[in-house]
Image (tube, rainbow, N blue to C red):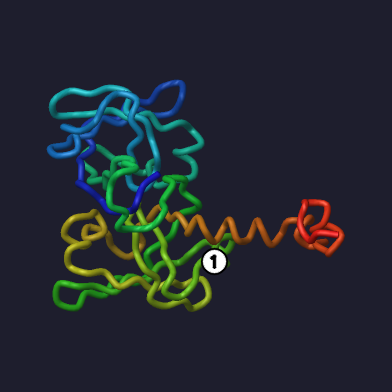
Amino acid sequence: MFTGLIEEMGKIKGITPNTKGKEFRIESKKVINHLNIGDSVAIDGACLTVTAQTKEYFSVQAVEETLVKTTLKNVKIGSSVNIERAVLAIGRFGGHFVQGHVDGIAEIVSFQRTGEAAKLKIKIPDAIVKYIVLKGSIALNGISLTVAEVNGSIVTIALIPLTLKNTNLGQKRVGNSLNIEVDLLAKYVENFLKSKEQKTISVEKIKTWGYGGN
């Protein structure tokens, strides 16, 4: 589990194709000091596992399914990626619940800067538009953000200077793609409402669960 608060931007230093997919070697100055082999780490919002580590680099393995469903398939040597370690149970939870399970890829259709801030417009895949709500949470490249406007499949995000400076969103341009993860709570609510059992709730059904008395 992650919070969507990016800890560091790393740089891709090596990409090695293998039978499972691709292994990425990532340069890090901050997070590397607090990682161990086997740890979960979010790279541009995709949850991966640390497979190797030195004092300057760590490696993660992305399987074919991950490459197909995320922007990691387009990452090149020299690309900057957002890094976040899995959240500690004793840590402060400052973002929102982010699993690192990418739901789709969004395309940047407008990127308007105003001073040091910016307004980002993205096109959301039709299959996940239903999970996007005004003022709700959304994760783009692993970053916890708030939805400012919703107009059909076009979603607007307001970006503060800190986000532009400390994440790779500041390097993106119109036409670029971003990993998107919708709010986990929205998916749970949908699943609950679709439940056949919930559709047939009655006094008799409740009594079979031990409630309601005689």
- Give above or below for 103 relative to 73: below
Residue at image coords 28%, 53%: 5
Q: Amino acid at mark 1?
A: Val
User: Circle 1 is placed at which residue position?
Assistant: 129
- Give above or below for 173 relative to 155: above
> Is 122 on the left-hand or right-hand side of 166?
right
Residue 203 position within the rendered picture, expressed as x and y whole percent measured from the top left:
83, 64
Residue at image coords 78%, 55%: 197
Q: Nearer the viewer, residue 121 or 162?
A: 162
Query: Seen from this angle, which residue lies furthest front?
Result: 214
Q: Nearer the viewer, residue 29 or 40?
A: 40
Residue 205 position within the rendered picture, expressed as x and y whole percent measured from the top left:
83, 57
Q: Quadrant of residue 51?
A: top left
Residue at image coords 22%, 62%: 163
Residue 96 position within the rendered picture, expressed as x and y whole percent measured from the top left:
38, 57
Quadrant in the picture for the N terminus:
top left
- Give above or below for 117 relative to 42: below
